[in-house]
Image (cartoon, rainbow, N blue to C red):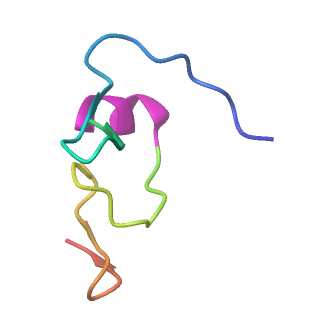
Amino acid sequence: MKEIIPLEEGDCYLSKEGYKVFTAKYHLKRGYCCESGCRHCPYGYDKKTNTRT
């Protein structure tokens, strides 16, 4: 079972379309890459090539 990490200020923001966007700060706190092509992925994952840089 995955650990639930409570959101803190700076962990996310709302896009102009109204979607919740997680920041690199949150991804690092979570501790792993979900390989979903996140906008602020600190792990270097590229969804187009399915690789990490």
Q: x, y (%) of residue 38?
A: 32, 57
Judge by depth and name the residue closer to the eye, 19 or 4: 19
Q: Quadrant of residue 29?
A: top left
Marks counted in the figure total 0
Q: Residue at x 54, y 16 (%)?
A: 6
The segment highlighted magenta reads 24-31
3 or 19: nearer the viewer:
19
Residue at the extreme bottom: 49
Residue drawn at 22 percent across, 62 percent down:
44
Q: Is residue 31 above or below residue 51?
A: above
- Residue 34 covered by magenta stretch: no
Residue furthest right as drawn: 1
Is most of the magenta stretch helix, strand or loop?
helix
Give me the residue at 46% from left, 39% from top. Answer: 31
Which x, y percent locates residue 10?
Answer: 25, 18
Q: Between residue 53 and residue 8, name the one nearer to us.
A: 8
Q: Residue furthest top?
A: 9
Residue 11 image-quadrant placement: top left
Image location (x, y in percent) of residue 33: 43, 55
Quick one: quadrant of the N terminus? top right
Q: In the rendered view, would you say 20 is above or below 43?
A: above
Q: Is residue 10 left or right of residue 37?
A: left
Position of the C terminus by quadrant: bottom left
